[in-house]
Amino acid sequence: MRCTVWKNKVLPFLCVCLLLLCCACGRTEKNSASFFAMDTIMQITAYGGTDEAIAEAREAIRELDVLLDATDAKSTLSLLKNGDLLPKTIREPLQTAQMIAAATDGALDVTLYPLSDAWGFYTKNYRVPAQTELQILLKNRGKFSVRDGRLSCTDGTKLDLGCVAKGYAAMCAAEKLRQNGVQGAVLSLGGNVQTIGRKPDGSDWRVSVADPLHPDGTVCDLFVGETAVVTSGSYQRSFTENGKTYHHIIDPATGAPAESGLLSVTVVCADGTTADGLSTALFIMGMERGTELWKSGSIPFDALWITEDADVYVTPGLAERMEQSNETYKKAICIK
Amino acid sequence: MKHIKKLSASNKRWIAVFAAVIVCCILSIILIKNIGGRTAVIYKDGREIARIDLSRLTESYTIPLDGNVILVEPGGIRMQSADCPDQICVHQGVLHDTGRIVCLPNRVLIEMQHTKDAPDAKAG
Amino acid sequence: MKKTKRIALDAMLAAVALLLFIVEALLPPLTSIPGIKIGLANAVTLAAVYLCGRRDAAAILFVRVCLGAVFAGNPTTFLYSASGAVLCLAVTCAVCRPLKKTVWVVSVLGAVAHNIGQLLTASVLLQSAAVFWYLPYLLIAAVISGTFTGLCVQFLLHRLQYRKGESQ
């Protein structure tokens, strides 16, 4: 009698339990990893694919970190001389940087290493250089061009791809994930966000934009598909001397931290390298020149500007994809 | 010993009822386990004390809260110590994506926020 | 049953319940989920309902909860155990007659009520409904521990050759 109860009632229930457990495990697997590279915290979350996919993406980032490190005198980037054949991993980000520089009247400049160094942003021994020193450094900073995949540069040229490196690394890592069968992923390389595909449930990725006044908080959420979202802001690296705050985004026109009336610029663009470089350029250019660049259409992108007056401006492409959550900032104005 | 050899009809009915209850519970536990986020919210006496995005954290620190000490580390949060007698909250270990830590004697609650409320990444 | 015998039996049961309660409090927590324990002391309450009647069971429970808080607890744990105990007793008394043939079912229902009572108190004290996320865990625990203590009582009552009428 007891046996029949066991057979008819309890065992089937146990089977159902097991079955349900199996169903729960059969969903798209989520893998994630956090690690330190390029002076920042990086996080990769991938749906579908394996742990190896993430390991390979991580390795790709590490290789680029070594290759593109301007502060390391022995890195491939630092050892480049006039006439050298550029490896693909330097040529690609460099060409993107040049393309942005051409479109923005030189707002993005990869030869500003001596100036950032003078301000102490590499060594963290911060100081405010004299006006004359900045002028001399600007004048002597060297010129370069790329012809037939070869670097042609004047003496004293010191390339720093820091303004596009994270965006490019994110693109390379994303490519590695795709090759390994990852259908959906979000990579955050120190706030430099790159997405692949969509979330497993088919919905958009939700990427929040950091609050430039309180970086722990957020200004708004953006709902995006496969794209890159990169923010440049004066809050990211800065130091204060004699009551004045100096940030790390150097304006090539003055050699000093850009004073464009902006707190941060967020760029949403299909190409991660472009998004990274463009966010820096747009921050330097300020609101007016930035909107002109968008209107000209020479580079297709969407952007979100936050000004020192707490105004928020967005391009129409982002207006319906954003959700504001912070009362400190005014309601976003859509530029036309 | 007749009573244990023979299971009456009402016994069988009740076994079925409780088995069903357990199945429902296991189901809901599986569902609950799949809801989660990366933001830990700390409550004391029902009041929100702190909201910490664990995925953005770079170094560990502790939050003292009367008799309790909460340890926040990159990707996890746990009760480091507590002056309560049972120490259950300390034994609950580290919270990563889901779940909650409760210290009943000291009325402290640590809860991971819903994924739906938390963004997938943060730019900046 | 004579009054003296009744008082003696009540006192003995209260002492046994208290002892079980204290011993269980000394054991390390079974799981990392608060509120889960075997509930050995509840077995005594259940047996008392059948052996001495509901009113005496309530008295035994009252003594056990109060003294238990003194010996192995603090004001907060007293609140939890009291709220659980009151709800458990209410349910046990309600179903003890119709389900007297399946004592273990009475025990499970009581254990479920006990855990729900504790959760209600916890949600009030923490001012948060989040503790109800523990409900499925606590229900499973209640069914298992309730079955265990209930079967203990069932066997105990049979050993004592308990028949209705004899205890009155």
Image (cartoon, rainbow, N blue to C red):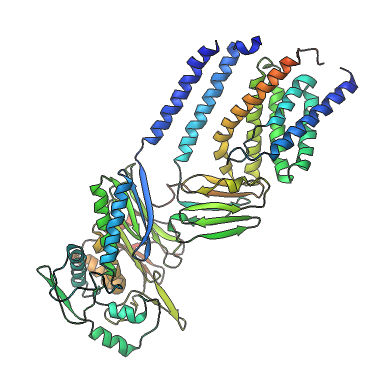
Indicate whether C17 appears above or below B81. above
Residue that protrudes farthest toward the left in the picture: A148
Rendered image quadrant of residue A21: top left
- Specify whether A143 is left or right of C92: left
Front one among A79 and B18: A79
**Picture coordinates of residue B103 (x, y %)?**
62, 47
Quadrant location of the C terminus of chain A? bottom left
**Picture coordinates of residue C161 (x, y %)?**
75, 13
Residue A148 visible at all? yes
Residue that protrudes farthest toward the front in the picture: A74
Q: Residue at x 42, y 76 (%)?
A: A239
Residue that protrudes farthest toward the bottom in the picture: A132
Residue A317 visible at all? no
Front one among A232 and A34: A34
- Specify whether A19 is left or right of B5: left
Indicate whether A277 appears above or below C11. below
**Picture coordinates of residue A181 (x, y %)?**
26, 44
